[in-house]
């Protein structure tokens, strides 16, 4: 029963970490987009802020939709192999972002993948992978034995 509950808890932590990773990647891209604008007045700044308030949840939904299956494959690999290093998760996030970018651009005939957009997406993938590692990746592959610890001898007291 303890093993089952620990597995359920682990799945919940993984899903929470995935949502946090998607949100952080989206916020990172939103910050990159906002950094490209030079608002000249308070009204323009308020308009930019309002646009980001709307854009971040919409972009998060789309990012989460497109990256869910590749991310869960990466999660399964890290859980099975017990990969707990931050670099594995950061590079995995970058690879997922790059794969999604190439897949989306290859579906449009005659479209050209802009290197600036691709590098921003890869950077956002790195941020998302790192956030996932902070929440769930550091304990990847952790096993609960399910048995009570036994003593091989006297405790000495």
Image (cartoon, rainbow, N blue to C red):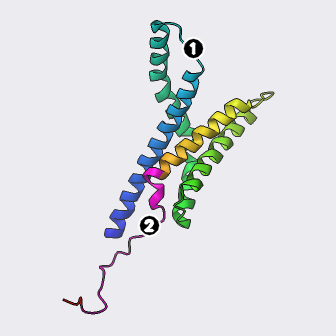
Residue 39 in the image: x percent, y percent? 53, 11
Q: Please give the label number shown on residue 38.
A: 1
Task: Determine whether, in the image, residue 130 is placed left or right of residue 107.
Answer: left
Q: Which residues are magenta?
A: 134-154
How many C-alpha atoms fall within 10 Å of the one at disc 1: few (<14), some, or many (≥20)?
A: few
Q: Is residue 146 covered in magenta?
A: yes
Residue 9 in the image: x percent, y percent? 36, 58
Q: Please give the label number shown on residue 142.
A: 2
Q: Nearer the viewer, residue 130 or 11?
A: 130
Query: Contact (CB < 8 A) between labels 2 and 1?
Result: no
The N terminus appears in which quarter of the rendering? bottom left
Residue at horizontal 49 percent and vertical 52 percent from the top: 133
- Residue 73 appears in the picture as rendered: no
Residue 116 in the image: x percent, y percent? 70, 30
Task: Determine whether, in the image, residue 8 is placed left or right of residue 157.
Answer: right
Cα distance between the residues tagged 2 and 1: 47 Å
Residue at horizontal 35 percent and vertical 64 percent from the top: 6
Question: Furthest residue to the right?
Answer: 110
The C terminus appears in which quarter of the rendering? bottom left
- Which element type, helix, strand or loop, lies under badge 1? loop
Q: Nearer the viewer, residue 108 or 155?
A: 155
Label 2 or label 1, whichever comes before in sequence order? 1
């Amino acid at each position: 029963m303890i093993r089952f509950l620990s597995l359920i808890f682990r799945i919940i932590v993984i899903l929470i970490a995935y949502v946090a990773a998607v949100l952080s990647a989206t916020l990172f891209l939103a910050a990159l987009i906002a950094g490209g604008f030079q608002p000249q007045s308070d009204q323009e700044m308020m308009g930019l802020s309002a646009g980001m308030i709307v854009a971040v949840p919409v972009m998060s939904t789309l990012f989460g939709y497109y990256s869910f299956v590749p991310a869960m494959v990466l999660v399964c690999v890290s859980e099975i192999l017990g990969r707990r290093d931050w670099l594995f998760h950061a590079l995995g996030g970058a690879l997922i972002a790059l794969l999604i970018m190439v897949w989306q651009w290859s579906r449009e005939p005659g479209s050209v993948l802009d290197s600036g957009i691709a590098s921003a997406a890869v950077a956002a993938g790195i941020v998302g992978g790192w956030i996932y590692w902070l929440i769930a990746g550091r304990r990847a592959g952790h096993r609960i034995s399910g048995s009570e610890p036994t003593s091989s001898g006297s405790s000495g007291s």
